[in-house]
Amino acid sequence: MTNSQKSDETPATDTAGTVPPDTVAEPPASGEATEQESATPAPATASTPAPAPAPAQPAADPLPAAPAPTPAKAARPRPTPAAMAPRPSGPAAAAVVAAPPIHSTPLEEAEKFARVEEDGHVFLLVDGEEFPVGQYPDASREEALGYFVRKYDDVAGQITLLEQRVQAKAPTTDMRKTAAHLAEQVAERKMVGDVRALEARLDALTTHIAELESAEKSEQDAARARELEAREAIVAEAEEIAGRDPSTVQWKASSNRMNELFEQWKNAQKSGMRLGRGTEDALWKRFRSARTVFDRHRRAFFSQLDNENADAKRAKEALISRAEELSTSTDWGHTAAEYRRLMDEWKASKRASRKDDDALWARFRAAQDRFFAARKAANEAIDEEYGANLVVKEALLAEARQLLPVKDVAAARKALQSIRDRWEDAGKVPRADMGRVEARLREVEDAVQAAEQEHWQRTNPETKARTNSALSQLESTIASLEDDLAAAEKNGDARRISAAREALEARRQWLDMLQKSAQDFS
């Protein structure tokens, strides 16, 4: 068997001694070497040549020799890199939902981070230290190196995918586990490439993931706080409604509102954020207690209301009986006063139920209407009788209006007295006209009285004497001010001139007013 044939059908093995997936596992030939499990070579540095590789050790559990491959097997194509790449399992498998981007590290670049022996053993170089990666036997150095570079590219691609998820601020579910799993793969040193760069990217990812988790937690806490505030608002309003004085509650509106709060609570329980069993149970107990108290108050209120309605009905029926007894009375004045007193008692009494109260009021009003209708008919008969008296008083009013405006107080007083005497002799007028005619006569009387008062003030000797005395004093003051003004003008004192002129002007205005008043007394 040639070396090329063996290379085509014998897969590479990593340090775990497993065959990459998607390949056909066949027993290796007895002469094939596996991974090194001991004696790590001394670290290689840039200034010293790489040490000679240690002889390959047989696998811990060597497999039996395989029969020579058939020509068909020898012609079988080499597995693809995707088929040979290890597949993640566990949390990482759940996190990686799409194929990672394909990374292709040039072999020239990868050679900076690896040493490959002739027998296919590959060593990773990290900061001058060598780590055995695995063996790709019966292949060229480039093929062995390329296989483990592809493992590096696969992990780098998964890191890139995770970076994209972090950049897009995707939900952080399992992101931390995915990053930890990738970090474990990098820490195993079973790949060839710049693992320090991968570690730096993973460290940055860990920091960003922590920031995203913190932001998500803050958003969740804020949403939970808003949900808690909404639930507490429902409970608080229910407690406020339940705590109102039952005598002031509008039961229909309050009952509707309590039902709305219950629907809001059910919707919050169904579609709102969970607050924790303890918190939700405590809020529900408060809400349920508020509804229970409200229902108890409502039942007690309406029970008491029924009793009060019955008492009110009995009291108003007693008032109706008395009103019906008075409905046939012809003692108009006394009976009308009694009806006013009964109305006051009716207004002061408590209301029965709306249906009963309306029926009771109709009966009470009917009794009143019968009495007042009879009184109205009697008054109309009297008014018809007093119609002639109204004609006489209308004529007297016309005569009294001719006295206005009052020019001769004595003559007006004498004429008005004559009108008053004839007014009394004329007798009563219809009730509907009584207020009108009395008011018109009172206007004339007030005008004559005002004229008398004005005449007295104008002819009062005491008032006239006081006015004349004030005139004399004011004239004396004006003369003195005129002397002061002349002296100030002589001395050229501008301040005194201005003050004297102002004072003199004011006194002259007063003098003019008093002189006009004195003319009224003349």
Image (tube, rainbow, N blue to C red):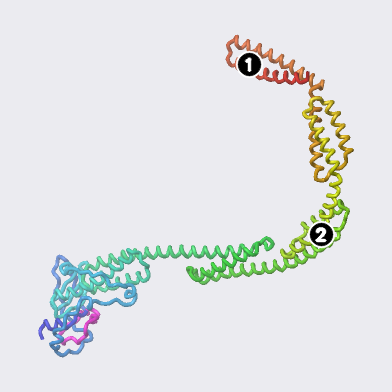
Give the class, few, some or many, for how many residues have Cα within 10 Å of label 1's Cα (few <14, many ≥20): many
Three-letter amino acid code at the position of disc 1: Ala
Helix, strand or loop status at disc 2? helix
Q: Position of residue 31 (x, y in %)?
A: 14, 86
Q: Position of residue 243 (x, y in %)?
A: 64, 63
> Taking 271 as reference, is 487 above or below it?
above
Q: Is residue 209 left or right of residue 135?
A: right
Q: How far apart are the alpha carbons under marks 2 and 1?
A: 84 Å
The residue lying at 14 percent from left, 85 percent from top is 74
Instruction: Please tell me which residue lies in front, 48 or 92.
Output: 92
Label pair 2/1, CB-CB below 8 angstroms: no
Quadrant of the image occupied by residue 78: bottom left
Report if residue 124 lies within the magenta region.
no
Helix, strand or loop: magenta stretch? loop
- Name the outermost residue toward the top: 490
Q: Which residue is mark 2?
A: 367
In the figure, residue 163 lies in which quadrant? bottom left
Question: Which residue corresponds to the image point at 16% horizontal and 72% vertical from the top-left?
Answer: 115
In the rendered image, the quadrant that contains the N terminus is bottom left
Q: Is residue 29 magenta?
A: yes
Kind of residue indicated by mark 2: Ala
Instruction: Please tell me which of labels 2 and 1 falls first in the chain.
Output: 2
Disc nearest the viewer among 2 and 1 = 2
Is the residue marked by circle 2 packed among few (<14), some (14-19), or many (20+) residues within 10 Å? many
- Image mark for residue 500: 1
Quadrant for the C terminus, please: top right
In front of the other: 441 or 79: 441
Residue 87 x/y as whole percent:
27, 77
The residue at the point 70 percent across, 66 percent down is 301
Q: Which residues are magenta?
A: 14-37
